[in-house]
């Protein structure tokens, strides 16, 4: 399943907007346009976009100014920018790239080249995201624990677990076979919340079992070591 990427075109010349929109839509992207920097900022701060095509020559606020604002606003600064302009001098190109633009295309441009550059930048960005934050999945029996998303699936279906239950499950599952006392779990999962009774651990274990186990009274994953504490099964 592929997700449609949304591109914001910031340009005041309707003919150029139409040309860019036509070609990007034909290539499978969704597009919106803004004809001033102010309009663009309003859209950028209220909706999600995957890339900005930014004309340099705009009324009121020019493309350099808008680029600087976007790159200094942490909520939108990750959105890649392709600058589009009739001015092709070296100095503009360098200034644009220094301000954080990802690419630069001069008018007149070939629509095919524009589409190719958009695709190249999105690929680069997506690759960057996935290699910098690998999603670790821990698989135990029918369970899949997505460590950075705080999500647990059982036979492919999402389970509704609280953050605390998730952390408890993750802690146990990453130390299979090791028995944890209630006190130790309080220390390692609840941490600095010192006013929690050991009984709280039992309550959370029971709730977790109700969610992850087929038969909570005869658990397969989280087991009890009588007189000691709890441990996660060593069986895969
Ligand atoms: Ca313009």
Image: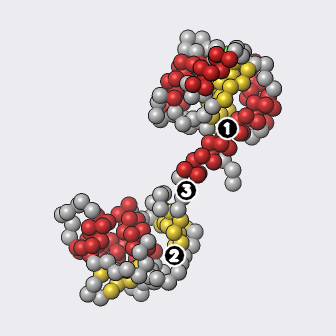
Residue 35 picture location, percent across and down: 62, 19
CA distance for labels 2 and 3: 19 Å
Question: Is residue 19 depicted above or below 28 in this figure?
Answer: above
Dot 1 corresponds to which residue? 121
Q: Residue at x 73, y 20 (%)?
A: 106
- Between 184 and 216, the one lying in front of the other is 184
| Direction from residue 160 to residue 89 in the image, left or right | right
Specify whether residue 20 is in view.
Answer: yes
User: In front here: 76 or 210?
Assistant: 76
Q: Which residue is mark 3?
A: 134
Please tell me how crowded label 2 is: few (under 14), some (14-19), or many (20+) other residues with Cα within 10 Å: some
**Residue at x-position 63% and y-position 31%:** 102
Q: Which residue is mark 2?
A: 140
* Residue 133 in the image, given as x and y percentages of width and height: 53, 52
Is residue 13 visible from the viewing direction of this image?
no
Point out residue 126 in the picture as x, y percentages from the top left corner: 62, 46
């Amino acid at each position: 399943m592929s997700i449609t990427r949304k591109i914001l075109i910031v340009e005041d010349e309707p003919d150029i907007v139409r040309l860019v929109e036509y070609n990007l839509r034909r290539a499978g992207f969704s597009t919106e346009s803004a004809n001033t920097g102010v309009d663009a900022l309003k859209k950028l701060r209220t909706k999600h976009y995957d890339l900005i095509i930014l004309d340099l020559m705009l009324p009121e606020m020019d493309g350099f100014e808008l680029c600087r604002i976007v790159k200094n606003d942490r909520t939108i600064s990750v959105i890649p920018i392709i600058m589009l302009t009739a001015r092709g001098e070296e100095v503009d190109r360098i200034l644009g790239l220094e301000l954080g633009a990802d690419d630069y295309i001069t008018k007149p441009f070939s629509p095919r080249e524009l589409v190719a550059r958009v695709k190249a930048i999105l690929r680069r960005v997506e690759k960057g995201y996935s290699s910098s934050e690998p999603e670790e999945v821990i698989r135990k029996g029918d369970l899949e624990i997505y460590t950075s998303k705080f999500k647990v699936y059982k036979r492919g279906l999402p389970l509704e677990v609280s953050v605390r239950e998730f952390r408890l499950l993750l802690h146990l599952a990453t130390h299979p076979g090791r028995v944890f006392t209630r006190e130790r779990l309080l220390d390692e999962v609840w941490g600095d919340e010192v006013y929690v009774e050991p009984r709280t651990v039992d309550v959370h274990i029971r709730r977790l079992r109700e969610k992850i186990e087929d038969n909570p009274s005869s658990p397969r994953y989280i087991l009890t070591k009588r007189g000691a504490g709890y441990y996660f099964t060593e069986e895969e």
